[in-house]
Image (spheres, rainbow, N blue to C red):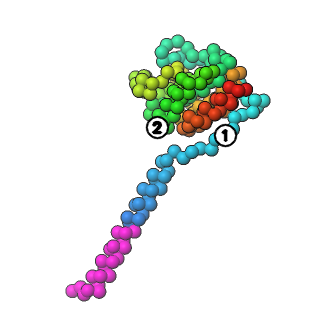
């Protein structure tokens, strides 16, 4: 038969094991949650004018029909945003791009959808987010489709068609606005 001391010892050992399990699971959840937070990325500076490289020719089919050409926007600052409907950070970033496109004179914004297959999801996303700037699609198996490191990726192009900055990952509207305004003053 069990005496009181043995029962107390077994009970406290069981509690200790359960307590350790709860602490371990709690720590795992906390670490997993922290890893999923979109931590702010370090803002890179705009590339100095003399170090900027010209963008290649960009001509892409527009969702609304016709062709969007970067060359048609010479003299404007351009934000070229690579995104997809399934990309959470893209969804967070889009409202800021919509505001910038509507508010900043001298800025052109274009969204390059990296979605594959049916374009119905893209149309629905554009309606839901009130996107007023052009949405275009890369050719299947094009370099744009194959070269993306991550989404969203945005390229800031100066008035002369040169790459001034590349943003990889979700970018805040304020950072875009600051950089665009700097290029507009050049």
Q: Residue lying farthest right?
A: 50
At 57% from the left and 16% from the top, the residue drawn is 68
Which callout, 2 or 1, points at the residue further toward the start of the chain?
A: 1
Q: In which quarter of the image is residue 130?
A: top left
Residue placed most toward the observer, 121 or 133: 133
Q: Quadrant of the C terminus?
A: top right
- 73 or 172: nearer the viewer: 172
The spot of residue 165 in percent (x, y) is 66, 33
Q: Is residue 6 left or right of residue 84?
A: left
Label 2 CA crowd tier, 10 Å (few <14, some 14–19, many 20+): few
**Can you tell which quarter of the image residue 141 is in?**
top right
Instruction: Give percent across and percent down for residue 179.
Output: 65, 32
Q: Badge 1: how crowded within 10 Å, few (<14), some, or many (20+)?
A: few
Q: Quadrant of the N terminus?
A: bottom left
Quarter-of-image position of residue 20: bottom left
Q: Where does label 2 land, which residue?
A: 88
* Residue 83 counted in the magenta span: no
Q: Which residue is drawn at 60% across and 27% down?
A: 79
| Mark seen at residue 44 | 1
For the question of whether residue 63 can be seen, the reply is yes
Magenta-colored stretch includes residue 9: yes
Magenta stretch in the rendered image: 1-20
């Amino acid at each position: 038969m069990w005496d009181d001391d043995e029962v107390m010892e077994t009970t406290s050992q069981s509690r200790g094991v359960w307590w350790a399990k709860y602490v371990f699971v709690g720590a795992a959840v906390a670490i997993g949650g922290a890893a999923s937070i979109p931590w702010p990325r370090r803002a890179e500076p705009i590339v100095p004018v003399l170090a900027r490289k010209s963008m290649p020719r960009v001509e892409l089919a527009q969702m609304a029909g016709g062709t969007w050409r970067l060359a048609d926007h010479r003299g404007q600052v351009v934000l070229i945003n690579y995104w997809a409907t399934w990309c959470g950070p893209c969804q967070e970033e889009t409202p800021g791009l919509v505001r910038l496109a509507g508010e900043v004179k001298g800025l052109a914004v274009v969204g390059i959808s990296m979605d594959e297959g049916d374009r119905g999801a893209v149309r629905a996303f554009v309606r839901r987010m009130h996107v007023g700037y052009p949405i275009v699609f890369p050719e299947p198996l094009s370099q744009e489709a194959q070269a993306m490191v991550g989404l969203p990726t945005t390229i800031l192009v100066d008035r002369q068609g040169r790459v001034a900055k590349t943003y990889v990952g979700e970018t805040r509207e304020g950072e875009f606005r600051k950089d665009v305004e700097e290029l507009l003053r050049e």
